[in-house]
Image (cartoon, rainbow, N blue to C red):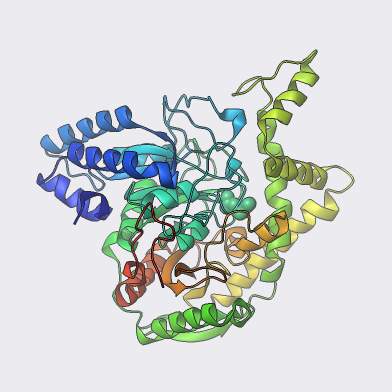
């Protein structure tokens, strides 16, 4: 098997065992990036020198006898996570030339565990979007069909892992930004419980929702990455002081004894016959693995989208106030300080970011605060309650990750149709729950001439990552959907259904 196609677990085993060096793995991945990234566009910055230096340090540590869980594993870092001395843009013109002065805790922990950051990955500007099309700095394509989007906002990290330009991608998920690109790129996309992974050094979008997590080609790799990045951090007051279980040692091979809830309100018939059949089969497979399927209801989940699109913009309008031309990034001079602010923000932010700031500022303004923001917070509580009630009768909930496979560029031209992409992922985010997307089959999208991957979303109660990853592993091992097609880079479309 090509070095670049190996899983993170495989690479770490070989590097720790001395059969290959971190330097050799890094060189192979950098050469592959140089060969394919012109077509795919996963990275905004490729860290050739930085990666080679990091690999040399890992080789020294391994030689000195250390066993590192991610020894030599090539890592794609979403470009909203700080890494000392590297350009960190959040996909925005306002930070196009900004260099991070420190490293995000989650990234630091991955490096400490032996991972090698090989590049900073493209993303929707400030993580607002579902296709990467809102990036102000580059276009990222889906490695399974270059005429389609990779999903977003962590689309660069997803495309990098799908195209073998990294073994692990770090993403951030506010309303679906790890799970949706995971589903679109045939990957496992895992959002831990809110507070499990430190947000220190993550450029904030909506602080009460933002959560870092991994994008990987296997569930086992997601578990190893999670173990490395999770845990309390004194630099993030919302990070939680709680034991992180050794999830990679608790992966299951069956689902016996588990009850899995199927959500009454998420009727997949509306998604078209082919997609409906994929999810019906997925639910049957869960049953065949020993799970008992039960009906659950989430009556307020339907309000998730409206609730999220008040809370997230409100928090973004506050978080993005700091980009004013004074402290960070771009400055456009003006006659006085107010004109400087205006010109800087007008030139630095793209249309979607401006739209969110406007909506958020309006929702927080004194006359409307109760009608919009407070009301949305109340709805958020009801949604979290619905999940609590549902989990009284089941251990996990199974649902679609997205309503469709990856779409073509410019297919969602009005903002609302883009927002709808997160219909299935937003309720879990509002409730802070751990959730993941795991490959569950292939469909031929309307007008498409090749099959594209779909994702099954699994969710479990707060802090039950071990149960969640364990169950996803059993499903993955039985079904092996991810291995049906491989991206054949550089050809459009890359495979036929
Ligand atoms: N697509 C959603 C949005 O645009 C979610 C983004 C995210 O999770 N970062 O806000």
Residue located at (50% from left, 46% from top): 239
Residue located at (52% from left, 68% from top): 448
Residue lying at the far right of the rendered structure: 367
Can you say which quadrant of the picture contains the N terminus? Answer: bottom left
Residue lying at the far top of the rendered structure: 335
**Viewer-proximal residue, 235 or 192?**
192
Relative to 213, 92 lies left or right: right
Question: Residue 23 is drawn in which quadrant?
Answer: top left
Residue 244 drawn above or below residue 29: below
**Viewer-proximal residue, 458 or 94?**
94
**Where is residue 25 drawn, in percent x and y?**
21, 42
Total labels: the figure holds 0
**Where is residue 84 drawn, in percent x and y?**
41, 27
Relative to 410, 440 lies left or right: left
In this view of the protein, can residue 241 be seen by the observer? no
Residue located at (70% from left, 28% from top): 347
**Where is residue 323 drawn, in percent x and y?**
66, 28
In this view of the protein, can residue 247 be seen by the observer? yes
**Where is residue 10 drawn, in percent x and y?**
21, 55
Can you say which quadrant of the picture contains the C terminus? Answer: bottom left
**Viewer-proximal residue, 260 or 477?**
477
Question: Residue 162 is drawn in which quadrant?
Answer: bottom left
Residue 32 drawn above or below residue 158: above
Relative to 72, 145 lies left or right: right
């Amino acid at each position: 098997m090509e070095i670049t196609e190996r899983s993170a677990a495989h690479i770490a085993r070989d590097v720790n065992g001395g059969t290959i060096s971190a330097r050799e793995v890094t060189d192979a991945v950098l050469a592959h990036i140089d060969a394919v990234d012109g077509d795919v566009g996963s990275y905004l910055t490729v860290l050739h020198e930085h990666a080679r230096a990091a690999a040399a340090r890992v080789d020294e540590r391994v030689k000195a006898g250390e066993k590192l869980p991610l020894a030599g594993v090539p890592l794609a870092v979403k470009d909203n996570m700080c890494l000392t001395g590297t350009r960190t843009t959040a996909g925005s013109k306002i930070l196009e030339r900004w260099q991070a002065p420190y490293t995000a805790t989650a990234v630091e922990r991955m490096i400490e565990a032996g991972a090698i950051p090989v590049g900073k990955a493209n993303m929707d500007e400030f993580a607002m979007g579902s296709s990467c099309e809102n990036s102000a700095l580059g276009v990222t394509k889906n490695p399974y069909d270059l005429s389609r989007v990779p999903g977003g906002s962590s689309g660069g990290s997803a495309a990098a892992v799908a195209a073998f330009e990294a073994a692990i991608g770090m993403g951030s998920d506010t309303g679906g930004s790890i799970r949706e690109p995971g589903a679109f790129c045939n990957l496992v996309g895992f959002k831990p419980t809110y507070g499990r992974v430190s947000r220190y050094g993550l450029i904030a979008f909506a602080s009460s929702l933002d959560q870092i997590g991994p994008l990987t080609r296997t569930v086992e790799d997601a578990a190893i990455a999670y173990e490395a990045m999770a845990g309390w951090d004194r630099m993030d007051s919302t990070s939680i002081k709680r034991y992180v279980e050794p999830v990679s040692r608790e992966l299951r091979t069956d689902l016996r004894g588990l009850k899995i809830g199927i959500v009454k309100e998420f009727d997949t018939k509306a998604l078209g016959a082919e997609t409906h059949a994929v999810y019906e089969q997925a639910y049957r497979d869960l049953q065949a693995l020993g799970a008992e399927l039960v009906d659950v209801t989430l009556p307020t989940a339907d309000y998730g989208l409206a609730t999220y699109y008040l809370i997230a913009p409100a928090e973004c309008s506050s978080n993005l106030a700091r980009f004013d031309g004074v402290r960070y990034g771009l400055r456009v001079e003006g006659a006085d300080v107010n004109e400087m602010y205006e010109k800087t923000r007008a030139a630095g932010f793209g249309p979607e970011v401006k739209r969110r700031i406007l909506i958020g500022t309006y929702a927080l303004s004194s006359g409307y605060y109760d009608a919009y923001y407070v009301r949305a917070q109340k709805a958020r509580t009801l949604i979290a309650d619905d999940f609590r009630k549902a989990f009284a009768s089941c251990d996990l909930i199974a649902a679609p990750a997205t309503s469709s496979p990856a779409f073509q560029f410019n297919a969602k031209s009005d903002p609302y149709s883009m927002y709808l992409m997160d219909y299935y992922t937003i309720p879990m985010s509002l409730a802070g729950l751990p959730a993941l997307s795991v490959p569950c089959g292939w469909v031929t999208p309307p007008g498409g001439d090749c099959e594209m991957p779909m994702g099954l979303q699994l969710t479990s109660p707060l802090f039950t990552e071990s149960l969640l990853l364990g169950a996803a592993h059993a499903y993955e091992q039985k079904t092996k959907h991810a291995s049906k097609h491989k991206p054949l880079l550089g050809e459009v479309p890359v495979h036929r259904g």
